[in-house]
Amino acid sequence: CLFLYLLMLYFCNLHKARVQYWSLLLMFWFSDLAAGLSTGMQGQMYYPTGATEDRLFMRQTFLLTSFIQQLGIAFFFELISFIWPMEMIKFLLERCCGCAGRSVRGGAFIVVTFILGLVNAYIAIAVAYTPASIVVVGHHPLLLGF
């Protein structure tokens, strides 16, 4: 609902640049948040962190490399699912639609941001309550901030 509200707010206020700016910025931030939640949970599922058995001192220890791997895979997933497509649409809008008006370029940008944010939010919600993510991440991963 929030994504749709910001999309309608942008297109219903074509002559108010300040409203368009804030709706575009908030749409981008919320879409990036949805991509971060989705990729963070996927990174945690593929590379779970936690205590591991230290074979040298025979005690439980926190292995830093699994945490770095989790961040790396989450960052890579976010690059693929959000950052690179947004960079591509910005590049295409600058090169191909340079003569078009601000509202046309902003409208294309906010529509692509809307689609990517909605897809990532749906993936985050769908993955959050699968049995595999409940075992690894917990019962309410979206509330925990993943």
Image (cartoon, rainbow, N blue to C red):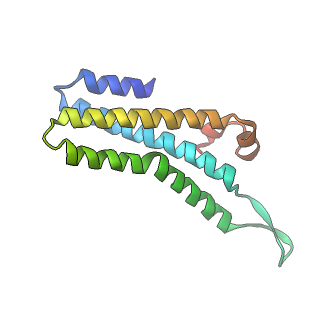
Q: In which quarter of the image is residue 134?
A: top right
Measuring from the top left, give residue 15's x and y in whole percent: 16, 26
- Residue sitting farthest toward the front: 96
- Residue sitting farthest toward the bottom: 56
**Nearest the eye: 23 or 119:** 119
- Residue sitting farthest toward the left: 99
Residue shown at the point (71%, 67%) measured from the top left: 63
Total number of numbered discs in the rendering: 0
Quadrant (top left, top right, bottom left, bottom right) of the C terminus:
top right
Residue shown at the point (40%, 41%) measured from the top left: 29
Measuring from the top left, give residue 70's x and y in whole percent: 62, 58
Left of 98 or right of it: where is 82? right
Measuring from the top left, give residue 114's x and y in whole percent: 40, 33
Residue shown at the point (58%, 43%) measured from the top left: 145
Q: In this view, does 86 lie above or below 67?
A: above
Left of 140 or right of it: where is 110? left
State whether residue 27 appears in this view.
Answer: no
Residue shown at the point (32%, 44%) measured from the top left: 89
State whether residue 23 appears in this view.
Answer: yes
Measuring from the top left, give residue 140's x and y in whole percent: 67, 36
Q: Quadrant of residue 100?
A: top left
Left of 48 or right of it: where is 58? right
Left of 29 or right of it: where is 131? right
